[in-house]
């Protein structure tokens, strides 16, 4: 009798346990194990959020490579003649695009762009003035004013731009009213560019120069601005503006003399410091 009662009690206990703790199906167990493996492999959602996106990584890498190429091209342009630079880009025109992409990126760090100062100056004058833009880049001046503008650069990526060595443009003598050099006195023979501007300017024509300020800082290896102004004046110009107020660039305005200088003494052109960008 005792054995029968014990057997019944054991049976009831097994039934209660079966109701309280239902067994998982093999399918549910497999799903749980898969989720554990996925979570372990992925390192959790927080790890996924910390992982850099491939597109951002590639963009950063391209930007660094582009910056390095720009620095090399920039140094090349400052340390060779205009003719050598022209031949260099003619061999591989894609280098010109690479340079100007890097140049535009550098300009985003400037609080004010010198080209805008020149555009404002031209806008305040008669639209009948004919302009020669030496080293025009993207021809922003021509696109921003009503004047007739001859845009020159080493490579032409726009129908309005004339590709040439800036010391030898196709313009007739005494054919323009304004000659512009906006951050473009880069060659070792920069004086020949200014001489070409003097040739194509009409008497009383304007020469506008905007350059990186550090190139005219004698305390840091730059040229003395007085020596530069004297050299340009000896060529046949009169200085009309020297603006050093901007922390990034200087503005120099000259007017071509009505009559050429009678004294043909040798002009002492100062060496302009190359503007080399630091690696970031």
Image: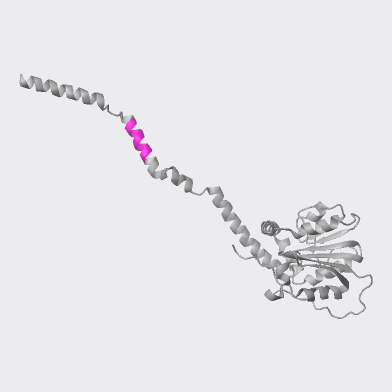
Report which quarter residue 5 is drawn in. Answer: top left
In this view, the residue farthest toward the front is: 245
Q: Is residue 244 magenta?
A: no
**Vertical placement of residue 113 versus 238, above or below:** above
Relative to the observer, which residue lies in front, 219 or 44?
Answer: 219
Residue at x-position 91% and y-position 76%: 261
Relative side of 19 to 266, left or right: left
Percent x, y of residue 178: 87, 62
- Estimate the x, y position of residue 67 in percent, counting from the top left: 62, 60
Residue 274 spot, x, y in % from top left: 70, 70
Q: Quadrant of the N terminus?
A: top left
Membership of 34 in magenta stretch: yes
Residue sitting at the far left: 1
Q: Quadrant of residue 32?
A: top left
Q: Is residue 27 visible?
A: yes
Q: In the rendered view of the protein, which quadrant contains the C terminus?
A: bottom right
Work out whether 97 lies above or below 257: above
Q: Is residue 254 left or right of residue 155?
A: right
Residue in the foreground of this view, choosing between 262 and 91: 262
Q: Identify which residue is drawn at 13% across, 22% down.
A: 9
Instruction: Report x, y in % for residue 2.
Output: 5, 21
Name which residue lies at 44% across and 46% down. Answer: 47
Instruction: Identify the main secondary structure in magenta.
Output: helix
| As drawn, 80 above or below 27 | below
Colour scheme shown? one colour
Please report the bounds of the magenta region as a residue range.
28-36
Q: Is residue 95 left or right of residue 35?
A: right
The answer, for residue 170, to whether it is visible in the render is: no
């Amino acid at each position: 009798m005792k054995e029968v009662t014990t057997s019944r009690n054991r049976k009831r206990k097994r039934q209660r346990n079966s109701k309280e703790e239902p067994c998982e199906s093999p399918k549910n167990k497999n799903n749980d194990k898969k989720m554990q493996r996925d979570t372990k492999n992925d390192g959790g959602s927080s790890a996924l959020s910390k992982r850099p996106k491939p597109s951002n990584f590639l963009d950063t890498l391209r930007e660094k490579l582009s910056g390095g190429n720009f620095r090399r091209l920039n140094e090349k342009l400052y340390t060779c003649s205009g003719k050598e630079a022209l031949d260099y880009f003619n061999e591989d025109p894609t280098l010109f695009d690479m340079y100007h992409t890097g140049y535009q990126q550098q300009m985003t760090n400037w609080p004010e762009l010198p080209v805008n100062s020149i555009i404002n100056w031209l806008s305040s004058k008669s639209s009948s003035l004919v302009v020669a833009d030496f080293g025009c880049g993207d021809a922003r001046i021509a696109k921003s004013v009503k004047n007739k503008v001859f845009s020159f650069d080493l490579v032409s990526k726009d129908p309005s731009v004339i590709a040439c060595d800036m010391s030898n443009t196709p313009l007739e003598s005494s054919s323009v009213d304004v000659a512009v050099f906006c951050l473009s006195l880069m060659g070792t023979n920069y004086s020949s560019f200014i001489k070409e501007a003097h040739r194509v300017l009409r008497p009383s024509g304007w020469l506008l120069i905007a350059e990186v300020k550090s190139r005219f800082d004698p305390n840091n290896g730059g040229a003395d601005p007085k020596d530069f102004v004297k050299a340009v004046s000896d060529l046949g110009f009169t200085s009309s503006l020297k603006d050093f107020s901007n922390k990034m660039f200087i503005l120099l305005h000259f007017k071509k003399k009505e009559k050429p200088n009678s004294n043909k003494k040798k002009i002492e052109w100062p060496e302009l410091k190359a503007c080399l960008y630091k690696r970031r």
